Every structure is written in structure tokens, then in C-alpha cells.
Image (cartoon, rainbow, N blue to C red):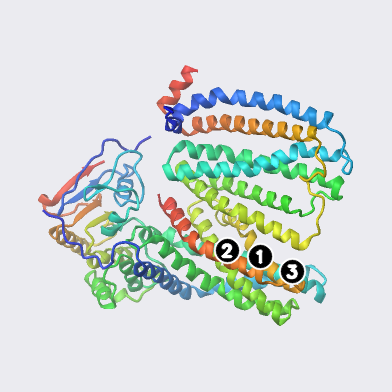
Amino acid sequence: MPLWRDVSFAVPWGSALLVRGANGTGKTTLLRIVAGLTHADAGVLCWRGAPCAPFAPPLRDDLLFVGHAPALSDELTAAENLAALASLGGDDASAAAVRSALDLLDIGRAAGVLARALSAGQRRRVLLARLALSARRLWVLDEPTTSLDDGAVAWFEATLAAHLARGGVAVVATHLPLRMDAARRMELVL
Amino acid sequence: MGINWFRYASPVSFLPLARALAPWFLATAAVLGGIGLWLGFGVAPTDATQGDAYRIIFIHVPAAWMAMFIYVVMAGWSALALGYNTRLSAMMAQALAPTGALMAALALWTGAFWGRPTWGTYWAWDARMSSTLILLFLYVGVIALRGAFDDARRADRACALLTLVGVVNVPIIYFSVRWWNTLHQGSSISLTAAPTMAAIMVTAMLVMTFALWAYCIGVVLWRVQAIVAEREEGAPWLARTAVAR
Amino acid sequence: MTEPATARGLPAGADTVSVLAALRWGLARDLAIAFRSRNELVVQLVFFVLVASLFPLTLAPEPGTLAMLGPGVLWVAALLSSLLALPRLFGRDFDDGTLAQVALSPRPLPALVSGKMLAHWLVTGLPVVVLAPVLGAAYRLDAAAGALLAASLALGTPILSLLGGIVGALTLGARGGSGLAALLALPLYVPVLIFGSGAVAAQAAGLSASPHLSLLAAGLLLAGMAAPFAAAAAIRIALD
């Protein structure tokens, strides 16, 4: 049984596609396809006009993917985790940059805490701190605002707006409301 | 020329072919097997040194050959499955694995029965026997890995990769086991090198080899039909061909 | 709106610099994690010692018998302890989502995987290499045999990490966990076991051990070149 058919979209530079839908409608699957983690049974994914197979280098070069999974190693501190992830993507992973990114999300105090001791909200913040370090052109974010408080959500909205204003592209699955510029916003309901 | 082989890369067009061919191969196997067994156990003379015990080679040697050969064929289908992403190739590899394991087990079993009167023991850590045992484990590994996933596509690709890693290793394993064997054991009577093979023995062996070939192809074509039916359950084309039958 | 300039810090492609940088990333991260969880590494090492010390209890501990069985027993113990450590290599990263980040990063995945495998060998294989001559002494192996055993393990245990990496990646998310991994890995380990333990046995029989060591070295080269690519492919299959 296919999850959906005839889903088609093109996201122009500077715009965000919000993917909405009830649980089980395949938001995460769609995001995994867009991120190049998995392939669609039929159809093509294009990045900058060229078709992309899963894990194709041109897509990986430009992609920042934040999925459901925490992607934090329990044995490393918040700062070490963030530095490792940033350096993995070739972003600025200097101690100063990492610290200021954590401060932006108000978890500078937890920088030296092992990830296993962080709360769900704190883990989410560490992950989102990557957005502050990253200059990738495509952000694919799965439920980025889950378990965040209002302040962090506001920070996320501002950061996303700045990314789009730079000309970046985002594909965001969310069932929570997001305040953003209507001109930059596209919506896909599954 | 003019035949589009990729046409048969799709289960839709391959299934009728498999359905039509499988009975023929199985019938051929039965006829050739009957002739081969009659030649091997009735007509061929008793061996001067090994007595009648040698007659088991008419089953043992073809089975051992098939066990090795099927692994290579499986690797070929696996390479196609990974390279071209064709569903049918993966299904063929899946259908081959149990038959390959059966052939390896048959070779080991008949080898043990040959070893008892000849070596005085069922199991002598002979190089060929040991490497066939490891080959059996490789087959069991592929089958077990297949069973460890619910997602057929994931299982296809993981098994294909494992088979390719295995096929690179098979020659190394054979070489290493022979090496180990020559270091640790004096030469013993080998199962395949009967001192003088009478022409009738060669004929019987060849007939049995073709019989096992036909059996393996027939059974694999039969099994692949079941796999297609299981995997594509509910697909509209499958219902159509079923009705057409 | 036009295409934005990219501000990536990584050079595109898989040139030597980016390959080495990726290898270093995998190595540094996994060594840091291993250092934090060193208790588990000690457990794995104790397991190795324990397996090796159980064998003499099952037979009459006569010097001749022990010296004859020693290399094989220590090699089997090394094999089993390597198997025990296998889930550490990719399992946790797969569970917590890091492996998806690794596979989606612009860095070359086989190089990242090589770094992780190297770290895995440094923390699980190298201690076994160092401990083996000590245990060898308990098996009445003389100094030369002990040194040869260590040499064979030094060449052979990295192959175990490399092949184990492929199997570990193939079994990610599979039912049957470590039993399945053992079933898949052990047949592949057979040549390593034969050449490794054979080196010491050949020397004891008055033959040269160098063919065995050469074959192990050749195997290490082959596995070192091919296994990272196979493991990378297996990881991508696992994430799909």
C-alpha cells in the first residue's frame, strides 16, 4: 500500500515548505526522502535542478538534517556532541562558536553535562544549536519544535527566518503552529 | 539478437516463464536421476580399492559441485540486485539459498557416509569437508539474515551485500583450509580422485551432475514463484496472471 | 530569489585531505567515547582472559598439551572477544541517530567508517595483542612463540575489526542481534584464525612462520581496502 501518490512540489530559494498531516500520514518518510536517506518507490528527487539518488554527494554537501532521533552520544557532553556534529558537516566547530551557539539557546550552563543527563528539551536545544552554526543551503527538520518552550520556539522562528532571508531553503514537518512570513511559506498537507 | 533480456528482469514477465519451465526441469531431473543412479549403483563396476562404498561419489561429488556453484550464481544475482536494483534478481538469490544449503548438507552427509568405511570415521577434518561445512554456514548466514528483517527490500539488499562479501571470501576460505590441512595431515585417500575412473563411472557422474543441475534449476524456479506470490500479494498484475492460468 | 552562496567549510570531493580529515573525525570521536566508557572495554578484556583461562581447566594442564593448544585457544578467545565488542562499533550510533548524520554528512562515508574501525581496533584489538604473550606464558609458550603470537594477532585482529564492521553494519536493526552477528562473522573469520594460529604452530614444528604472516598481511591489505566500502554500503542499506 503506497503512503501517498502524486505528491509533487518545488521549493524556490528563500522559501520553506511546511509538511503537515496527522500521525502516520508519512511526514517523516517524506522528509527522509527529501534528505536522501531513503528512496521513493516511484518518482524523483531533484536538488538544484539535477536528479539525486539517496546519499548523492551534491545533496549531502548542502544538507542539514535534524530528525526524530536525538543524534547525541550519551557518553559525550553537550558541547562535545555539538562540536562533533558541526565538524562532521564542516561547520565552525571551535570551542567559542560552540559555546556561543549553546548560549543562544540558553543551555550554555549545560555545556559540560553528559548528554545522557540532559532532559528531552535540552537535547532538542543542543540539536537546534546546530542551526546557529550551519550555513547549509537546505534544512530538513522533523518536528523541530517538539518539547521546546515558547522562548526556544521564538528563537527557532527567528533563525529560520534569517536562513530563508539568506536565500536558504527549508523543509519542515510540524504539527505545531509556526509564525513565519506568509510570502516565504508553502504548505503541503499529507 | 532482438531479444530484450531486461524484459525478464521484471517478475511480471518472468513469472509465466518460471511457471512453464519449472515442471520440465523437474521431470528432466527425475529421468536423469533415475538413469544416473541405475548406472552408478547397477552398471558401474566395484572399485578395486574402495569396494562398493565409492558409489556414493555419484551423489556426493555433484552435490559438492552444486553447493559451490550455486553460491557463485547467488552472488551473480546479488550483484545484479545491488547494481540494477531489480527485484527479481534479489528474489532469485533468495530462492537459491535454501537449495545451495541443501546441496552443501547433502555433500557433507554423503561424505560422512563415505568416510565411515573408508577412513573409519564419519568426520575426518578433511580439507574439502571442512570448507564445505563453512560454505554451509555461509548459506545458513544468508538465510538467517533474510529472516531477521521484516522489510523485504532491506533484506534483499543486506543479503546481496553479505553474499558478495561471502563470495570474495569463499576462495580465501578454501585456500586457507587446504593450507591448514596440508600442514597438519598426511595425504589420505581423496574423495574425488578415484585411482582409475572407468568410462562408465565418468558417464554416471556426468548424468548425475546434469540431474542435480536440472533439479536445482527446477526447484529454484518453483520457489521463486512462491516468493513472487508472497511479496507481490495484492498486486493487480498477479491476480491477472493467476486468472490467466 | 537567487541561489545563495554556500559557506561550507568542507572542500567538495574525496581528495586525500578530506579522506584523512574524515578518518580523523571517526577516530577522535570514537576514542573519546571509548575513553568515557572504559569500564565496558575492561569487561571485554576480562572476557578474553577468562575464556583463555577456562581451557586449561578442561584438560590435564601438562606443559606439552598447553603449549600445543595455546596459540589456537588464544586465537579463538581473541575471536570471541572481538565478537563481543562488535555491537559497539555501529550499534549505538545507529540507535541514537548519529549514524544517519554520519551517512548524510558531506564527508566520504568509507573514510569516516575507517576511522571508526581503527578506533574500534585500538580499544578492543590492541589490548588483546598486548595481553596475549602474557597469557601465552601461562600456556608455556616460550618468549619467541609469545612474540610470534603477538605479531600474528597484531596483523590478524585488525582484519577481525574490518570484517566485523561489515557484519555489524549488515545486522543493524535486525532481529537476533549478537547471535546473528556471530553466525555471519565467524565463518568469515576462519582464514584469519587458520593463518594466525598456524604461524605459531609452524614455528613450533620447526618451519618458518613468515608465509603465515605474509598471508595475514595480504589479508589485512585486502580487507583494509575493501571493507570500509562494504561497511559504508551496508550502513546506507541499514538507514534506507
Q: Is A7 on the left-hand or right-hand side of C134?
A: left
Using the image as rendered, state which of residue B228 and residue A171 is in the foreground: B228
Q: Amino acid at mark 2?
A: Gly
Q: For residue C55, which numbered disc appears in the image?
A: 3
Q: Position of residue C224 (x, y in %)?
A: 50, 64
- Give the CA separation, mark 1 to mark 2: 10 Å
Chain under label 1?
C
- Which residue in the protein does label 2 denote? C219
Chain under label 3?
C
- Give the CA separation, mark 2 to mark 3: 29 Å
Q: Position of residue C146 (x, y in %)?
A: 68, 78
Q: Is B116 situated above or below C156?
A: above
Asked if one can make out residue C40 in the rendered structure from this viewpoint, the answer is no
Q: Amino acid at mark 1?
A: Phe
Of tags 2 and 3, which is closer to the observer? 2
In the rendered structure, are the residues bearing label 1 and label 2 in contact, judged by CB atoms less than 8 Å apart? yes
Secondary element at image label 3:
helix
Asked if one can make out residue A118 in the rendered structure from this viewpoint, the answer is yes
Q: Is C64 on the left-hand or right-hand side of C97?
A: right
